[in-house]
Image (tube, rainbow, N blue to C red):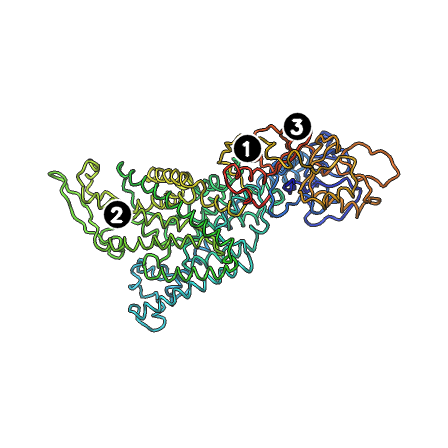
């Protein structure tokens, strides 16, 4: 049985039949196609024959261009969960562009329209950047306020979060007791701030607010926008590769994802808002692209805007515009031409500027975790840095495998039928486990910033900074100030180890629930805990043995040698790399995130070690693993096909099975309608005849249905006995009903391969040309069809995986 993915696209909007009728155009008629049609009629140098039909007849001038009055509604539209045709969409845009360039010489108005077309892409990404920055700022401010609402409120100005309420006294998160303007819930109820009763009341309100926020977030997602759950990055990767998921980037998804993200982050769940920011920015990009028909009506061109929007999403999530561009290039984009790179850079720049204007990070910097230390690292430290990279790869692999197991269990068990109940149970467990530990009680962003920070002399509020400072003589004349960890540091290490175990376990169960949830921040948190503990250990080693050869020549500046905060930064990068398998964009995001430009080499070493170890233990990152789990048709361009099979081994049907085809001039309307009813294929090869199966072209199921339906309704004399013609030759005169000419919907240049073509070449064609199917021939005769689903299933079969996990075309 042939399984042909639908070949239609927005570029097919002009695939009309050779009908002699007029109809009133709808509001969605393709104006670009109308311009192209007029161009083809008025300029005689346009070829009268193209790959998509003979343009000499009335009707469609060429593929992708039609008069709105002749347009058949629905032709060329994509079905849900199907793949776009990159080649047709790009060819259509080139035709449109050539027409506009030619027309610019005719009048001033055409010149202005050509200028508008040229800068419409820049204007679109400008709007996307402004909107993404504004929405991200609102989410940051809202999430910060609601997160602090679990602990108390600012009576003088209830809309202030704790930091803003205590801003005049510049108190840290551990100095809450000294902030008179911030009132905890026990104080609001007339009790003392401290004590057993106050602790119980605070515990109760902490869990109650968390359950309320989580229930509201899960309910909004379930009722109004089911696509708003999760991080969205696996689906964004799949969409940018050419897949259609209706509603995934719509207005409701944008609204519910934004509100639900604030609620789920405020609930204290082990998730971040940075991944969903990419989904939110992509929704904004999709909405604004419809303001410009050049992008809104061409799915391949629209993905250029979506790539720029994804870059803006990372830019506003971390305050890292360059890292956002590299993230879009390395991790999510499938088609990334040079002009998309420039526009992504511009979009990320505008988004970061707008976000900086709103100052959601509450300081004078536009980055999330700005660090103020700039001590140089020494060569010896590369050993613990690489060790952190190895551990990051191990932790990332453990998380991926455990999360996939749980998501698979949720998907195929009754648990998946109760998404709100699951969210509430996980929220309750999270609240019960996290409140007693001061490190897990605070916001994850605050904890990461605390772990990244350097201890200053006299800092007694941070338990990680309980150090004894002393001078050790180095030689006869100089002395070195060193710090010995005190009991508070060791107590903090125990709490951090507990926090690490709890957060790792909770992240496994949280990622994949039916609430907006990202994993950037949980991954950074796990790595920063690990890194800070390792950093304290290295610092203790340097304190115990300051004069050994490893530190020769390094301990001469009179200052402490080891910076534990740097180890937290490197560990965070290593764990995030182990989970996502990012490299270049990860390093750039991390030094933009912290302002630590001088630590690029340690970050690079840890990122590479993490990726090598992660790839050795498990081939896929978390996003690719979830793409495979959901059965999306994603062909990863970074992987290689190393098997020796041929096209004949993969094509459908096999050599001893019947191939369903349409003949060019011998089948009636009834014959074709019967074929459409008896088969479910999304396209059919057109051949010369049943006996002489030489390939003529390829026609789409949707186009056939719509063309026949419109012909019966609007063309007089068309009956079930009418011969359907896919040729331009004059039909033989007979006494029967008039023939139905459908050459206009025929693709006369389908991509073909021979049956002896290596599958390695076929897979490369699907990846690099964005194909949806290719036809297989032998000596010019049609043998079968290979679809994208066939290729994906064959790849999985060759890799000893279940081919039936590929669910979509």
Label 2 belongs to which residue? 536
Image quarter (top left, top right, bottom left or bottom right) of the C terminus:
top right
Residue 164 visible from this viewpoint: yes
Determine which of the numbered discs, if any, sits on residue 673 in the image: none
Determine which of the numbered discs, if any, sits on residue 764 in the image: 1
Q: Provide residue 283's location: percent of width, then percent of height.
A: 54, 50
Neighbour tally class for label 1: few under 14, some 14-19, many 20 plus, Cα within 10 Å: some
Q: CA distance from mark 1 to mark 3?
A: 21 Å
Q: CA distance from mark 3 to mark 2?
A: 69 Å
Check the image and name the residue furthest to the left. Answer: 476
Q: Quadrant of residue 615?
A: top left
Check contact, mark 2 vs mark 1: CB within 8 A: no
Left or right of 108 in this view: 326:
left
Of marks 3 and 2, which one's residue comes earlier in the chain? 2
Closer to us: 216 or 473: 216
Is 529 situated above or below 664?
below
Q: Quadrant of residue 253?
A: bottom right
Numbered disc 2: secondary structure: helix
Determine which of the numbered discs, if any, sits on residue 778 in the image: 3
Closer to us: 598 or 329: 329
Mark 1 or 3: in front is: 3
């Amino acid at each position: 049985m042939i399984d042909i993915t639908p070949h239609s696209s927005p570029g097919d909007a002009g695939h009309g039949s050779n009908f002699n009728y007029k109809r009133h155009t709808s509001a969605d008629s393709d104006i670009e196609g109308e311009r192209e049609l007029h161009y083809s009629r008025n300029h005689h140098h346009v070829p009268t024959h193209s790959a998509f039909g003979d343009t000499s007849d009335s009707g469609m001038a060429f593929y992708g261009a039609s008069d709105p009055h002749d347009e058949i509604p629905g032709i060329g539209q994509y079905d849900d969960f199907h793949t776009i045709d990159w080649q047709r969409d790009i060819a259509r845009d080139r035709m449109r562009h050539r027409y506009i360039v030619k027309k610019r010489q005719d009048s001033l108005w055409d010149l202005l329209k050509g200028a508008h077309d040229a800068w419409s892409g820049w204007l679109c990404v400008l709007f996307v950047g402004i909107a993404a920055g504004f929405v991200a700022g609102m989410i940051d401010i809202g999430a910060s306020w609601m997160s602090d609402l679990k602990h108390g409120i600012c009576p003088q100005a209830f809309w202030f979060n704790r930091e803003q309420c205590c801003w005049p006294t510049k108190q840290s998160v551990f100095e809450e007791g000294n902030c008179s303007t911030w009132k905890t819930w026990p104080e609001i109820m007339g009790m003392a701030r401290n004590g057993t009763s106050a602790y119980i009341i605070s515990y109760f309100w902490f869990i109650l607010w968390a359950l309320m926020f989580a229930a509201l977030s899960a309910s909004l997602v379930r009722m109004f926008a089911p696509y708003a759950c999760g991080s969205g990055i696996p689906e964004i990767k799949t969409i940018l590769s050419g897949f259609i998921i209706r509603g995934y980037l719509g207005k409701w998804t944008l609204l519910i994802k934004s509100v639900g993200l604030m609620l789920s982050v405020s609930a204290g769940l082990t998730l971040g808002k940075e991944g969903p920011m990419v989904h939110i920015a992509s929704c904004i990009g999709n909405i604004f692209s419809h303001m410009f028909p050049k992008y809104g009506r061409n799915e391949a061109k629209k993905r250029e805007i979506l790539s720029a929007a994804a870059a803006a999403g990372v830019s506003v999530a971390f305050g890292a515009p360059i890292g956002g561009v590299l993230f879009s290039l390395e991790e999510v984009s499938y088609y990334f031409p040079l002009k998309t790179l420039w526009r992504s850079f511009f979009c990320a720049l505008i988004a970061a500027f707008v976000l900086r204007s709103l100052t959601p990070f509450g300081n004078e910097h536009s980055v999330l975790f700005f660090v103020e230390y700039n001590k140089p690292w020494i060569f010896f430290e590369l050993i613990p840095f690489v060790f952190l990279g190895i551990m990051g790869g191990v932790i990332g692999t453990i998380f991926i495998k455990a999360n996939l197991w749980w998501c698979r269990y949720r998907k195929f068990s009754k648990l998946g039928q109760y998404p709100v109940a699951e969210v509430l149970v996980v929220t309750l467990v999270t609240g019960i486990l996290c409140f007693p530990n001061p490190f897990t009680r605070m916001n994850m962003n605050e904890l990461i910033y605390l772990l990244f920070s350097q201890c200053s002399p006299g800092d007694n509020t941070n338990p990680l900074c309980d150090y004894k400072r002393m001078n050790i003589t180095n030689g006869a004349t100089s002395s070195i100030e060193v710090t010995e960890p005190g009991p508070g540091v060791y107590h903090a290490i125990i709490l951090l180890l507990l926090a690490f175990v709890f957060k790792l376990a909770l992240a496994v169960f949280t990622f994949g629930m039916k609430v907006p949830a990202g994993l950037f921040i949980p991954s950074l948190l796990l790595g920063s805990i690990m890194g800070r503990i390792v950093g304290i250990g290295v610092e203790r080693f340097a304190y115990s043995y300051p004069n050994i050869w490893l530190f020769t020549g390094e301990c001469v500046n009179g200052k402490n040698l080891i910076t534990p905060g740097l180890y937290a930064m490197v560990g965070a990068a290593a764990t995030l790399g182990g989970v996502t398998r990012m490299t270049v964009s990860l390093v750039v995001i991390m030094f933009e995130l912290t302002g630590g430009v001088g630590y690029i080499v340690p970050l690079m070493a840890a990122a590479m070690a993490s990726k090598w170890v992660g790839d050795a233990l498990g081939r896929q990152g978390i996003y690719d693993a979830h793409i495979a789990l959901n059965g999306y048709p994603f062909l990863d361009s970074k992987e290689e096909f190393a098997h020796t099979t041929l096209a004949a081994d993969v094509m459908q049907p096999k050599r001893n099975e019947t191939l369903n085809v349409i003949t060019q001039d011998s089948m009636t309307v009834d014959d074709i309608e019967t074929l459409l009813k008896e088969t479910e294929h999304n396209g059919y090869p057109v051949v010369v005849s049943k006996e002489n199966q030489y390939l003529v072209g390829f026609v789409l199921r949707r186009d056939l249905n719509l063309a026949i339906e419109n012909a019966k309704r609007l063309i007089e004399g068309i009956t079930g006995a009418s011969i359907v013609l896919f040729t331009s030759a004059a039909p033989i005169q007979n006494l029967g009903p008039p023939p139905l000419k459908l050459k206009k919907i025929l693709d006369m240049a389908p991509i073909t391969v021979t049956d002896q073509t290596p599958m390695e070449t076929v897979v490369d064609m699907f990846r690099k040309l964005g194909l949806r199917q290719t036809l297989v021939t032998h000596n010019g005769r049609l043998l079968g069809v290979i679809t994208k689903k066939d290729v994906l299933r064959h790849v999985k079969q060759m890799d000893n995986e279940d081919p039936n996990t590929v669910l979509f075309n």
